[in-house]
Image: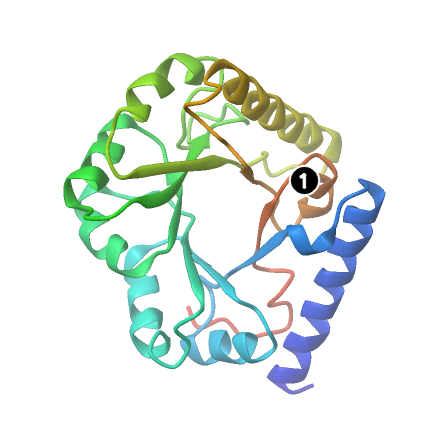
Amino acid sequence: MEIQQQLQVNLQRVNEKIAQAAAKAGKNPQEITLVAVTKTVSAEIVQALISLGVQNIGENRVQDAQEKWEILHTAYPTIRWHMIGHLQRNKVKTALKIFDIIHSIDSLDLGDEIAERASVDIPILLEVNISREPNKHGFDPTHLQDEIEPMLRVPHLKIQGLMGMAPLTSDLEVCRQCFIELRQLKDQLNHAYQGRLDLHHLSMGMSQDYEIAIEEGATIIRVGSALFDGIPSSK
């Protein structure tokens, strides 16, 4: 099967599962943003995916994103680029040139660095370590309500929601509980900071668990391997 055909089959399968999960949760699938995680594929593959209607591209590393963005952004100016991996402070300047939204703000220091370099408001999500794994980045969910106060005073940070990752496990109920916790945390923060904070987005769910994430309130899902199954890696 040709690459374009394989991508179309994969994308159709993912969209069908999104629609099914949304229907199960009584949601409109059009309100769920599919971010294609393209870290393993070339700019040519990304271009083919864009030609099939994908409008949101996610990258884990600034350098990889920059290479693809420089090739594609002039021809496809309406594509939204999402930074979904850990962002180092020394990469912020470049990241601000590329990305339309940053999912992975995991500290006040990183927020300050963005504010120092930004000249306009930057849409961001706060990364929360909902799996509580020591090797993962993100705010501690039990302390975020206290830590968010200074974030609200940082200029140019437009906090739009939360991002989290469930552990890599075959036990999908473990994933579900992580997603429930993130949704509840979003609701708690909106209540605690009513009038100062309006968290709308929940970025949660990847190839192995995005259907459950949708059922539990995801508005953004980050899907890579399910879209690129059968597609040669460029890495």
Camera-nearest residue between 52 and 121: 121
In the picture of the structure, the residue carrying the numbered disc 1 is: 213
From this view, report whether residue 214 is shown above or below residue 80. above
Q: Position of residue 233 (x, y in %)?
A: 49, 71
**Residue that appears at 49% across and 14% down:** 192
From this view, report whether residue 102 is shown above or below residue 144. below
Camera-nearest residue between 154 and 56: 154
* Location of the N terminus (image quadrant): bottom right
Q: Amino acid at mark 1?
A: Ala
Q: Position of residue 18 (x, y in %)?
A: 73, 54
Q: Is residue 79 left or right of residue 168?
A: left
**Residue that appears at 27% across and 26% down:** 108
Camera-nearest residue between 118 and 5: 118
From this view, report whether residue 206 is shown above or below residue 9. above
SS under mark 1: helix
Q: Is residue 122 left or right of residue 223?
A: left
**Residue that appears at 48% across and 78% down:** 47
Q: Position of residue 117 (x, y in %)?
A: 16, 45
- Residue 88, quarter of the rendered image: top left
Camera-nearest residue between 27 and 70: 27
Q: Is residue 89 left or right of residue 99?
A: left
Name the image colouring: rainbow
Q: Give the number of callouts.
A: 1
* Location of the C terminus (image quadrant): bottom left
- Residue 232, quarter of the rendered image: bottom right
- Residue 62, quarter of the rendered image: bottom left
Q: Is residue 163 left or right of residue 223?
A: left
